[in-house]
Each structure stands twice: as structure tokens, then as C-alpha cells.
Amino acid sequence: MDRAPILVHRISPSGGRRVVIRVRGVDTVLGVAYNDTDLIEFLRRIDIDDPDELVLGDSEVIAWQGGQPHVYAVGVGGA
């Protein structure tokens, strides 16, 4: 699933996860998400259709790297 166009990187030591979109082989950093609401907002800003469903529906378009999906801080939710 690492080839998904939206990559949510592993949790940083200070918390949060870098979010990257890959279009035509070029990665663009959208920002650092500290929760699902941040991730949804990043996707809304780039005109992704129905970002809530994409994030909360556990779409295969999103690759969660390192740790559990929807967890944004070390020691929270088993990450």
C-alpha cells in the first residue's frame, strides 16, 4: 500500500504525522496532521472529493506508514 497517492508518515517524536500527496511521481507535503480533522482539512484544501469518507472510511488511497492508522501521538491508541 506504500504506492497510494496519499502518504501519512510515521509519528514524529514531537507528535503529528507528515502528510504527502504523490501526483505523477512528485511528492508534495500538505502539512503535519495532529488528528483526522487536520488530515481531512488538508484534503479539502486540494479539492479532494468527500475527504471525510476518504479518511474515516479507511480508503486504500491513503497509506499509513508506521504505527496504527488514525493515531497521531506516540503512546496513544497502541502506536
Image (tube, rainbow, N blue to C red):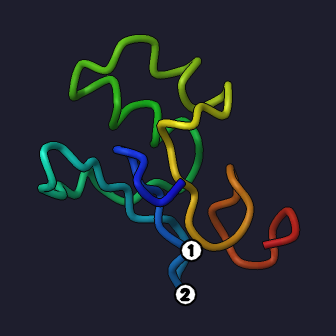
In the rendered image, residue 6, in percent from the top left (x then y), is placed at: 38, 46
**What's the residue type where badge 2 is placed?**
Pro
Q: Nearer the viewer, residue 30 or 6?
A: 6
Q: Would residue 79 appear left or right of 72 to someone viewing this image?
A: right
Decide: marks 2, 1 in contact (CB < 8 A)? yes
In the rendered image, residue 7, in percent from the top left (x then y), is placed at: 41, 55
Residue on which the image places disc 1: 11
Q: Residue at x 58, y 41 (%)?
A: 36
Q: Would residue 16 appear left or right of 31 to someone viewing this image?
A: right
Q: Residue at x 56, y 74 (%)?
A: 11
Q: Would residue 67 appear left or right of 13 to someone viewing this image?
A: right
Q: Residue at x 22, y 58 (%)?
A: 29
Query: Label 1 crowding class (10 Å Cα cut-off): few <14, some 14-19, many 20+?
Result: many
Residue on which the image places disc 2: 13
Quadrant of the image occupied by residue 59: top right
Quadrant of the image occupied by residue 18: bottom left
**What's the residue type where badge 1 is placed?**
Ile
SS class, disc 2: loop
| Residue at the right extreme, as displayed | 78
Looking at the image, is 60 positioned above or below residue 73? above
Q: Which mark is residue 42?
A: none
Q: Residue at x 70, y 58 (%)?
A: 71
Exactly how many numbered labels are in the figure?
A: 2
